[in-house]
Image: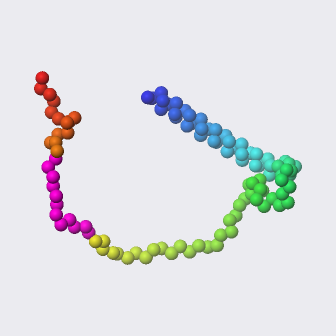
Amino acid sequence: MTAFVRRRADFAEFLHRLLAAGSAALVLALAVFAASPELHSWLHSDDGVAGDDGCAVVLFANGVSAPLGVIAVVPPSATWQEQPRAIAEEICLASPRYLHQPERGPPVQG
């Protein structure tokens, strides 16, 4: 069992390292494409985009600012309300079927 757990941990560590390497490669590629206008225009050679407003390279190079207005969050009003309690009119008790469950009974005297 411990070998299986160790293999899972090794696989999870491998996936973490692969994700980290992929993220670093993506940042490096975006930086290179942002620094070189020729490579950036090479990326857009097929689709003929006139503007680069939605381009990931331009967004990476210039940063993204979301134009949001100030949002006023109103806290909820705190009012105390007494919750009704459930009251049982009659309590029904039944005797248990077994005092000890069959698998938990006393040991067999032999």
Residue 85 picture location, percent across and down: 26, 69
Question: In this rendering, would 45 be left or right of 96?
Answer: right
**Closest to the observer, 101 or 22:** 101
Residue at image x 56%, y 34%? 11
Q: Can you give x and y, in whole percent of width and height, for residue 10 in the image?
A: 55, 32
State which quarter of the image contains the N terminus: top left
Corner quadrant of residue 49: bottom right
**Can residue 36 be seen here?**
no
Left or right: where does residue 81 sit relative to residue 94? Answer: right
Dividing the picture into quadrants, the one containing residue 84 is bottom left
78 versus 15 height, above or below: below
- For the residue pair 110 and 13, the one nearer the viewer reads as 110
Image point 68% across, 65% down: which residue? 66
Q: Position of residue 30 (x, y in %)?
A: 76, 49
| Drawn side of residue 82 relative to residue 107, left or right | right
Q: Quadrant of residue 21?
A: top right
* Residue 18 visible, this orientation: yes
Residue 94 is inside the magenta segment? yes
Q: Is residue 103 above or below residue 92?
A: above
At x 74%, y 45%, the residue is: 28
Q: Which residues are magenta?
A: 85-96
Is 24 positioned to the left or the right of 99 in the image? right
Q: Which residue is rendered at x = 12% and y = 23% of the image? A: 110
